[in-house]
Image: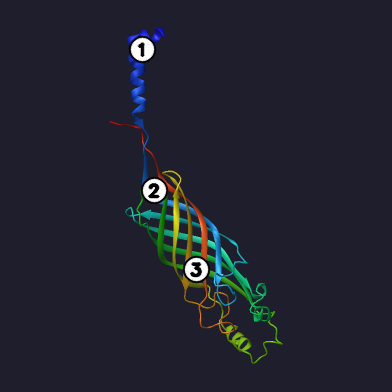
Amino acid sequence: MIFLKNPVFTGTLVLMVLTTSSLQAQFQSTPYEVGIQIGTLVYQGDLVTPNAGNLKSLYPSIGLNISKGFDPYFSVRANFLRGKLSSDEADFATPAYRRQRNFSFSSSITEFSGLLVFNPFGQNERKLSPYVFAGAGLTFLNVKRDWSKLDSTVFDSKSAAAVGLGKDTLTNPPRVIAALPVGAGIRYNISPQFSLNLEGMFRFIATDYLDGFKYAANPKNNDRYYGLSLGLHYQIGGYKCPVVKR
């Protein structure tokens, strides 16, 4: 306690405490953010029965993105995604013709897209914030279709499936298709720099050959696919030198 009786030491100690308590490092963010998405893609089309799509053949997908904010409500985002789609009619017992027709396909998916993202509550201190988005993109495919297990005792040469298959085999599946992605998500802010997000993205596409079949299946409706993913995002920035709070 003898040191506390020294006025020089006591004054120095008080000054150090006050100075330390008044310094605060501030995070300086930029409008840019990068992220990674892990999820899966779901096929909807002629070779699947449930309206929700083929949930029996799911493969992991990975996406990378970078976004730039223009104001608290709007930002643009560039996406890259790699995944896979497939379906086999043998997986579905009803209707009965599924296992008799026995069409199947698989395709890799490589997608590039640009999105406009709208956050209705703006960028603020909320831990949870929903958002919606829409945009345009290109999807690169490598469709491999298989009709070798078609039951010819059920589908003879005059059946609609056989006649349609003759037309389909004369058409090569597309290698590149245009896509219009729309979707929604919810964001959870872990810190000023890191956040998690959960989102679903549906793609409108103008082709019925995503699965390689059109006339042999249902030529009235186009195929579709959507994705579900969980992401980790990093707000680019850093901490400035401490400043004195007055």
Q: Which kind of residue does numbered mark 2 sit on?
A: Arg
CA–CA distance in space, label 1 to label 3 = 71 Å
Label 3 SS: strand
Which coloring applies here? rainbow
Label 2 SS: loop
Confirm or deny contact between disc 1 and disc 3 (CB under 8 A): no
Q: Nearer the viewer, mark 3 or mark 2?
A: 2
Label 1 SS: helix
Q: Position of residue 203 (x, y in %)?
A: 47, 69
Look at the picture and state if 126 lies above or below 59.
above
Q: Earlier in the sequence, mark 1 or mark 3?
A: 1
Q: Which kind of residue does numbered mark 3 sit on?
A: Thr
Look at the picture and state if 13 lies above or below 202.
above
The disc label shown at residue 9, or none: 1
Q: In which image quadrant can residue 82 be found?
A: bottom right
Residue 88 lies left or right of residue 171; in this view the side is right
The disc label shown at residue 139, or none: 3
CA–CA distance in space, label 3 to label 2 = 35 Å
Q: Which kind of residue does numbered mark 1 sit on?
A: Phe
Residue 97 lies left or right of residue 181; in this view the side is right
The disc label shown at residue 137, or none: none
Q: Earlier in the sequence, mark 2 or mark 1?
A: 1
Q: In which image quadrant can residue 19 be found?
A: top left
The disc label shown at residue 126, or none: 2
Looking at the image, the residue that sits furthest to the left is 246
Observer-nearest of 152 and 78: 152
Confirm or deny contact between disc 3 and disc 2 (CB under 8 A): no
Look at the picture and state if 213 lies above or below 113.
below
Residue drawn 35% across and 13% down? 10
Observer-nearest of 121 and 135: 121
Q: Position of residue 169 (x, y in %)?
A: 60, 83
